[in-house]
Image (cartoon, rainbow, N blue to C red):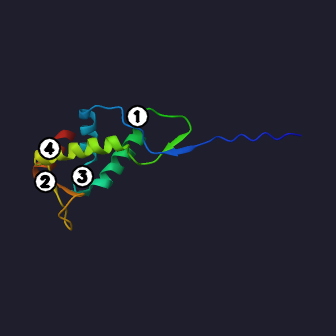
Amino acid sequence: MHIRMNYSSIFNKDLPELCINKKELTDLVCDALPTKSNSFDFVNLLTAIARQCIANKTKFNLENNVEYNEVLDGTDKVRIREIIWDLIILRYLTLGDYYHDTWPHLSVTESGIAFLVGRIS
């Protein structure tokens, strides 16, 4: 008697590069920014964006038998960092939070909150 075992291989991987343009990525970044408590950390923002992409399953090419980690591709991290600097130049974000005054800690300014809330309405 032969017993046949059916093993399905599930692999854990970081997310592949997102298949979106800069405007779509900017929208993802803005959607992930806080509007209530205005301070956040860049690494936590990256995790929130990755989590959002995994939940939607629409921003990257899905592979069979893969469970994705909440870690973005390096290229996307660079693109998001550039978007953050764009938002700093627009005065929607500023460096520092309640306890730290340097990168990677950031805060949404009053005009930034108005901008973000206006996007939702």
User: Judging from the image, what secondary structure is the residue with disc 1 in?
Assistant: loop
Res 82 label:
none
Q: Which residue is mark 3?
A: 34
Mark 4 belongs to which amino acid? Phe
**Disc 1 versus disc 4: distance between alpha carbons?**
28 Å
Please tell me which residue is depicted at 21% across the width and 40% down the height of the picture.
Answer: 120
Which residue lies at the image location 52% right of the left edge and 46% below the top edge?
12
Q: What whole-number distance in Å separates the C-alpha atoms at marks 4 and 2?
A: 10 Å
Identify which amino acid the numbered label 2 is placed on: Thr
Give the structural element (helix, strand or loop) at label 4: helix
Q: CA distance from mark 1 to mark 3?
A: 24 Å
Image depth: mark 1 or mark 3 in front: 1
In the displayed orientation, state which residue is furthest to the right.
1
Tell me the tag on residue 109: 2
**Residue 54's quadrant in the figure?**
top left
Q: Nearer the viewer, mark 2 or mark 1?
A: 1
3D distance between C-alphas at marks 2 and 1: 31 Å
- Tell me the distance, in whole angstroms, between the alpha carbons under discs 3 and 4: 12 Å
Q: Does 88 sit above or below residue 56?
A: below
Left or right placement of residue 94 versus residue 77 in this view: left
Disc with the residue nearer the chain's start (1 vs 3): 3
Comes first in the chain, label 4 or label 2: 2
Q: Which residue was labeled with disc 1?
A: 60
Quadrant position of the N terminus in the picture: top right
Residue at left 38%, top 43%? Answer: 73
Residue 121 visible, this orientation: no
Q: Earlier in the sequence, mark 3 or mark 2?
A: 3
